[in-house]
Image (cartoon, grey):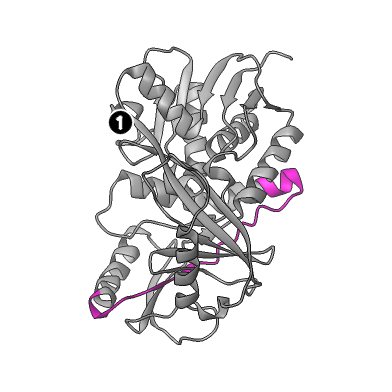
Amino acid sequence: MASVDVTVRGGGIFGLACAWVLAGRGAKVRLIETRAIGAGSSGGLVGALSPHVPEQWNPKKQFQLESLLMAAAFWGGVSRASGLPTGYVRSGRLQALADAAAVAKASERAEGARELWRGAAEWQVQPATGAGWEPLSPGGYLVRDTLSARLHPRLAARALVAALQGAGAEVVIGDAAEDGLVLHATGAAGLAALSDDLGRHVGGGLKGQALALRFAAPPDAPQLYADGLHIVPHPDGTVAIGSTSERDVTDLATDHQLDALHARAVAALPCLAGAPVIDRWAGLRPRARSRAPMLGAWPGRPGHFIANGGFKIGFGMAPKVAEVMADLILTGQDDIPPGFRVEDSL
């Protein structure tokens, strides 16, 4: 193999997105995935790109806002380069409100959105109608935000691989030599390896489960959030429902908890009744000890870098993570926000 400038280890969303931006900056890139593209949490079903609530603002929420606003250009570029769909649609989100207190709190957050999102998106409280593609709302009202978007994780990963190969990057499934600088984006296994290297716990994997139904929602349908569930329509005629968050990772098979998720989803959105289950997924989602993405240089290993800890927001954070890591690796420019640095999890 020819020598490369940057080796990216990990074929999940952080590894793929960073490799894509690095290649776009002119770097010769080799991406190495030892098992399969999206073998970890990036091979899931849900693909909800949703913001944190617009209050108690902090660097993590600002970073996420900027990344969500970058997403249309990022995923559009991937689709044009690959000729493949990613399933990206910025169609917003509807959230059910449980009671009068939740309605009042949501109305307060509308003011926060006007101030913090600065016209880039809206957060509105509106009456529930109970009809069509709309979750039942015990409080009688819904939140509609126009910042949320959705994509199909597996389609997005496939398109990124094709875009990388079209740009001349090497994509290796298995193992290969590391050349040049090395970026480790290896998910839960990577957090375990980093913990072992540093002699202290910096993060690990939490099990998640999700399922998909065969159901054709309207093309511009928003994603839904009700009863703690994400209900996400995809343009391939499926609806994804997720997800659990489990600390017991001894068994990564799907189990009865998905049946409970399914029942709750149908109760929240009755039009899903009778839609067949066509896929069930379980996997490990990497969570850093700080609960924010873990970005930066690997302590004590010159020329090695970390991009990990996407947990539940990896796809939403990926465009901004990729830009920040490309700046750091290629030019030394360090724009990693407080709370995201590797040392913040030490």
Q: Position of residue 286 (x, y in %)?
A: 43, 38
Residue 8: in sight, yes or no? Answer: yes
Question: Taking 262 as reference, is 178 above or below it?
Answer: above
- Determine which quarter of the picture holds residue 289: top left
Question: Taking 302 as reference, is 25 above or below it?
Answer: below
Q: Does residue 106 appear left or right of residue 256 in this picture? A: left
Residue 273 is a magenta residue: no
Q: Which residue is drawn at 65% across and 35% down?
A: 36
Q: Where is residue 199 in the image (x, y as percent from the top left)?
A: 31, 18
Q: Residue at x 31, y 76 (%)?
A: 98
The range drawn in magenta is 78-101
Q: Which amino acid does label 1 sit on?
A: Ser
The N terminus sits in image quarter: top right
Residue 91 is a magenta residue: yes
Question: Taking 93 as reference, is 188 above or below it?
Answer: above
Q: Position of residue 75 (x, y in %)?
A: 62, 49
